[in-house]
Structure formats: C-alpha cells, structure tokens
Image (spheres, grey):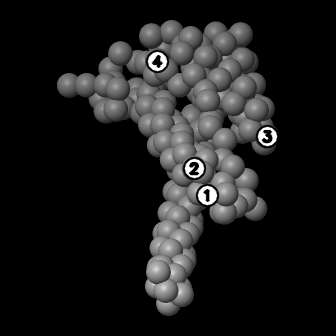
Amino acid sequence: MTSQAWLLLATGVLLVLVAWTGWTLTRLRRLAARVDRAWAALDMQLQRRAGLAGELARNHPAALGEALAARLAAGAAEARAARTDGDRELAENALGHDLRELPDELPGVPPALRTDLDGTQTRVALARRFYNDAVRDTRELRGGRFARWAGLHRSRRLPRYFDIDDRVGSVSKDADPAGRPAG
C-alpha cells in the first residue's frame, strides 16, 4: 500500500470516529434532557401525592383515626421536606406505606379526594417507571466501552435510580386503577 492509501484509510477511520462521537454525544444530551423531564414529572406527582395526603390528614382526622391522621400528616410533611436522594426515597416509602394502610371506607371524605389520591398513586408509579427507564438508558450508553474510553459526559453526574415501593393500593373501591370513577 502506498502512503496515499494509508492516509486515505486513516482519514476514513478518523471521520467514522468523529461521526460516532458526535452521534453518541447527541444521544447523551437527549438522554440527559429525558432524565430531567422524567424527574420533573415524577417530582410533581410525588409533591401532589404528599399534598393530597396532607389535605386528607388535616381535613378528615375523624375518618382516619387520630393516630393514622397524625402519621399521615407527618409522612406528607417529611416527604415534602426531604431533599437528598436517600432521604427522599425513605420518606416516600413511608408515605406510600401509610397510604396503603388507609381503610377501604372513609366516612365523610369526599369521593373526589379519594379518587384523586388513587389516580395520583397510579401516576407516581408510572412516572417512576418512566424516570427509571431514562436512567437505565443513560447508564447503558455511558457505560459502553467507547463512551467510557472517550470520557463522554464525564463531567455530568451519573443519574441514580429512584427506588420506592410504589405498589398501588386503592383508597376507595369506587375507582379503577387509572383513577377514574367506576360506573
């Protein structure tokens, strides 16, 4: 092979590497935006769930019983105040557990509030799955041999999974899993 052929081959390989790097960086940027959007949606649903739980505990302690109402109010406040990832997961797990312990019948509680709480529980589960899917895709791409070797997105923090027990427990028997009234 002549030196000109080697130069042409090296230029071709270099162009492929530059194109691959550009494509990978674009995917990483899109995945980072997807993680951010999914986190915003998950955070919104978690805040909504904590707000509804706090409203239920504040406005209807007789229907819940004083002990459960106090635990639910404290759990909602703790879930809203938690800022670090581990603390947030613990607080959200505790709140979810308290919400699953709600009795089937809540006399005096408006059906709209119960239905809204059921729907929010379902949306939390879905938002968490979307977020964790985005995290998985990001970790998979950043864990690839080429991305690690090239140090792509090394300056960005690797996203963490948000692991909570989000089993959907029904607050009322009058709602379907999507939170719509039955009938």
| Front position among marks 4 and 2 | 2
Q: Is residue 129 left or right of residue 40?
A: left
| Front position among marks 2 and 3 | 2
Callout 1–callout 4 Cβ contact below 8 Å: no
Disc 1 versus disc 4: distance between alpha carbons? 41 Å
Q: Based on the displayed image, in which of its 4 quarters is residue 179 positioned? A: top left
Q: Position of residue 136 (x, y in %)?
A: 54, 42
Q: Is residue 125 left or right of residue 29?
A: left
Q: Which residue is mark 3?
A: 84
Callout 2–callout 1 Cβ contact below 8 Å: yes
| Front position among marks 1 and 4 | 1
Q: Residue at x 48, y 37 (%)?
A: 129
| Front position among marks 1 and 3 | 1
Q: Reply above or below: 105 against 11.
A: above
Q: Secondary structure at mark 2?
A: loop
Q: Which mark is residue 144?
A: 2
Q: Residue 100: in sight, yes or no?
A: yes
Q: Reply above or below: 150 against 80.
A: below
| Front position among marks 4 and 3 | 3
Disc 2 versus disc 3: distance between alpha carbons? 28 Å
Disc 2 versus disc 1: distance between alpha carbons? 5 Å
Q: Which residue is mark 4?
A: 169
Q: Amino acid at mark 3?
A: Thr
- Mark 2, other Cα within 10 Å: few <14 / some 14–19 / many ≥20: few
Q: Amino acid at mark 2?
A: Gly
